[in-house]
Amino acid sequence: MNVRNRDTVRVPAGYDATLRITGWHPARKSCPQGCCARGQGDRNTYWIHDVGGGKNVLCTTNSR
């Protein structure tokens, strides 16, 4: 994972997509399926990354 300036338009060399961080939650058991969605009708695809040795999760979606 790489961090970039949010105003950058291009995907950094060596990568094929950029993800936007949308949330941070304690441990996965506190973040069941759908916990990253921004609302009931949210149809975005989210990826959940375990961070902090599995103590927290980071929610991401495609950057637009």
Image: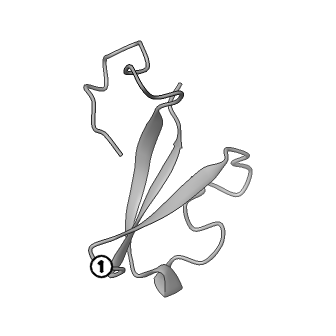
Q: Return the x and y of residue 18 as percentages of the image width and height.
A: 47, 32
**Residue ID at (42%, 26%):** 14
Q: Return the x and y of residue 16 as percentages of the image width and height.
A: 53, 27
Q: Is 52 positioned to the left or the right of 44 in the image?
A: left
Query: Relative to 44, does residue 15 appear above or below in the rendering?
Result: above
Q: Return the x and y of residue 22 as percentages of the image width and height.
A: 44, 49
**Residue ID at (36%, 46%):** 1
Q: Is 17 positioned to the left or the right of 33 in the image?
A: left
Q: Name the outermost residue toward the front.
A: 14
User: For mark 1, what is the residue?
Assistant: 53
Q: Return the x and y of residue 43 as percentages of the image width and height.
A: 73, 46
- The quarter of the displayed image where residue 58 is located: bottom left
Q: Name the outermost residue toward the bottom.
A: 29
What element does badge 1 sit on? loop
Q: Which colour scheme is used?
A: one colour
Q: Which of 30 and 55 is in front in this view?
A: 55
Query: Relative to 10, does residue 29 appear above or below in the rendering?
Result: below
Q: Is 52 positioned to the left or the right of 11 in the image?
A: left
